[in-house]
Amino acid sequence: MSVEQVRLARLLDRWIDPATTFWTATDPMTTSPLAGFMRKKRGVKAGVPDTLIWHRRRSVAIELKGRGGRCNPAQREVRAALLRAGCQWWVCNSADAAMWALKKSGVMFRTFVRSDGSIERWRQPKLADWEHPRRDPSEPRPMHPVIRAERRNAARRRRAWAREAALPTAAE
């Protein structure tokens, strides 16, 4: 379970009006091979997005990924099927990005009137370039700085290993 998924659930509980909107998170994990077999028999499909939202005849699907996460082939197939069915689909790297995507999809958020008469509304946070939600998982976007550094270091290690493997040994 991702920290961002829990954070998104809290944000949705707070800001989504249950009178006009329904949302649910999906649970793709199986506890055993038998449970997986039974889920498949019941029609549970691989690749279903993490969060599904219905707001006034609009369907929105949110696939929440970690900083370096990518959609797998099953998720891409489900995305295509959902788009054909008229659903809006987003891949997001944070709970804030998911809320941003919902706002862009036309989902209305609650407004709270405090006891002093002031009004509280959801405010869109500033998102980093790597964090902006995407409608298409193949759409290019900058990587999170930590992920970029990790991948750069891994590539350097692979190149160094390849150079060492290509060097003649002392016995030769």
Image (cartoon, rainbow, N blue to C red):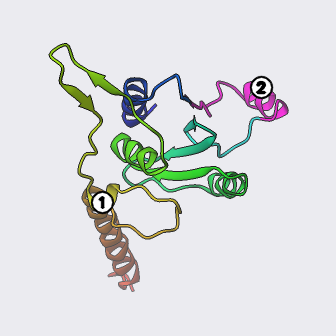
Residue 34's label in the rendered image is: 2
| Type of amino acid under label 1 | Glu
Q: How many marks?
A: 2
User: What residue appears at the point 64 percent right and 49 percent down from the top-left corner?
Assistant: 87
The residue segment tinted magenta is 24-43
| Residue drawn at x 55%, y 55% as measured from the top left | 71
Residue situated furthest top in the rendering: 115
Q: Residues within 10 Å of mark 1 (few under 14, many from 20)?
A: few
Instruction: Identify the image quadrant of the C terminus.
Output: bottom left
Q: Position of residue 67 (x, y in %)?
A: 36, 51
Q: Residue at x 47, y 41 (%)?
A: 107
> With respect to residue 77, does 99 lie above or below?
above
Q: Position of residue 171 (x, y in %)?
A: 37, 81
Q: Is residue 66 magenta?
A: no
In terms of depth relative to the viewer, which is nearer, 64 or 68? Answer: 64
CB of mark 2 within 8 Å of CB of mark 1?
no
**Callout 1 secondary element:** helix
Local secondary structure at mark 2: helix
As measured in the structure, the alpha-carbon distance from the residue carrying label 2 to the one carrying label 1 is: 37 Å
Q: Position of residue 82 (x, y in %)?
A: 68, 51
Above-or-below relation of 142 to 102: below
Q: Which circle marks residue 150 in the picture?
A: 1
> Could you tell whether 50 is left or right of 5 in the image?
right
* Among the two numbered marks 2 and 1 on one chain, the one whose residue lies closer to the N terminus: 2
122 left or right of 54 in image? left
Residue 73, numbered label = none
Query: Is 35 within the magenta?
Result: yes
Q: Quick check: 12 left or right of 47?
A: left
Q: Residue at x 52, y 67 (%)?
A: 138
46 and 157: which one is in front? 46
Amino acid on which disc 2 is placed: Leu
| Horizontal side, residue 111 vs residue 23: left or right | left
